[in-house]
Amino acid sequence: ELAAAAAAGGEVDNPRLDALQRAVRDLVGTMAPMGVQMLSVQLSEQFTRDDDPARREWAAWFLEQFFAGCPADFSPQLPLYLKDLLQRLDDSSKQVIFATGRALKALTAAVPVEELVKHLTFCRDLISSLASDKRHRPVAAGGGGGRPVQLPGLGVPKALDPVLPMYLQGLKHGTPPVREAAAAGLGELVELTAQDVLKPYLISITGPLIRVMGEKFPSGVKAAIVGTLTLVLARGGVALRPFVPQLQITFVKALSDSAKLVRTRAALALGRLMALSSRVDPLVAELSGAAASAGGDPAVQASLLHALGDVVCQGGAKAKQPATLEGAADAAAALVSSADEDVRAAAAAALASALGLVDPARAADLFAGAVLGAPMSAGMEEWP
């Protein structure tokens, strides 16, 4: 009826539409608990199964009024509402997307964030499934054809307002599994949100991730956080420059974590960070010294060398002191003959990154010493 009235007389100066809207507000304002489930099922059918965008739009408007005015407890129906609304993030109609955003905002305003967190994993799975379906859908059918995609519902202004508080609550106050899901889910939102829409949220996402990373949590939580921070760096660009010192400390500390996944992601993140860093020398010197002195733990030593190689590869050209890169090359060359296979491979990669940035004669000596066991200056007669 709402869609028909709007179509017949427009949405401005339409007495019939005005009367229907007043009736809806009166209805939800006096809704008894017994009627909540019946209404929820009927709205769900209109909202998710109707091929008419106008009817979906008005169903979303009805839900917005329901969340804002219903005095009855509708928490048992929260999964249904969340499913219906979040699935509209990939709707083909922009009017439906805007109406869905307003309904989501009304829902999250009506339900305490502590209650919403209980459904965080469910919401994350819904969004992830929606994105996966769009990514694998043919381009002709509105999909990505196997390429990364963004969701239309996350491409409008303030798109993250309804869901971000739930994710941040889970990250900061949830159990370890909830914190891990929240951190990974934030990364998914970062990937799926349009660049201009994401920009205002970068600080509010990055700060909590760094703070939680500094606390004692299982490696799964830390790996999810470092992975998401890497995505934030990739999407945020220069807007993340004020966080460079904190991020650098966070990633370097993670290189000593007991879990390989945390260390691997931290090494990759440090390399990505070099695009924003202007002070490369202290970090290269720190990693060189740490790699040289970490012989008691080959796994950590290999991770430090991976990080050193990535940092030198991505940011070595910014080094102001030649001795910094020579120190990195020396540290890597000394470990090319390590008894540990992973350390040898990481040292060789780090050495390769450094050799192209040091004095050619010095590079030749280091290469010969590491590979052939004798410096170039030793003379041909001393070579094996």
Image (spheres, grey):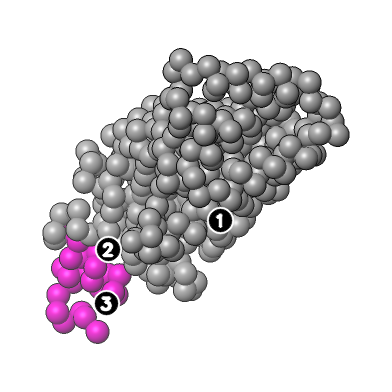
Is the residue under label 2 in contact with that under label 3 (CB below 8 Å)?
no
Q: Which residue is mark 3?
A: 372
Quarter of the image with the C terminus is: bottom left
Mark on residue 46? none
* Mark 3 secondary-structure assignment: loop
Sequence order check, earlier mark of 3 and 1: 1
166 is higher (above) or lower (below) than 70: below
Q: CA distance from mark 3 to mark 2?
A: 15 Å
- What residue is at 52 percent from the left and 29 percent from the top? 5
Kindly identify the amino acid type of the residue bearing the numbered disc 1: Ser
* Mark 2 secondary-structure assignment: helix
Dominant SS in magenta: helix
Q: Nearer the viewer, mark 3 or mark 1?
A: 1
Kindly identify the amino acid type of the residue bearing the numbered disc 3: Leu
Q: Which residue is mark 1?
A: 129
- What residue is at 50 percent from the left and 49 percent from the top? 51
Q: Is residue 263 magenta?
A: no
Kindly identify the amino acid type of the residue bearing the numbered disc 2: Ala
Q: Position of residue 61 (x, y in %)?
A: 57, 29
* Location of residue 170 by image quarter: top right
Judged left or right of residue 115, residue 101 is left
Who is closer to the viewer here, 149 or 352?
Answer: 149
Q: Nearer the viewer, mark 3 or mark 2?
A: 2
Instruction: Identify the magenta region.
Output: 362-384
Q: Position of residue 379 (x, y in %)?
A: 14, 75
Q: Which residue is mark 2?
A: 352
Judged left or right of residue 337, residue 34 is right
Q: Residues within 10 Å of mark 2 (few under 14, many from 20)?
A: some
Q: CA distance from mark 2 to mark 1?
A: 41 Å
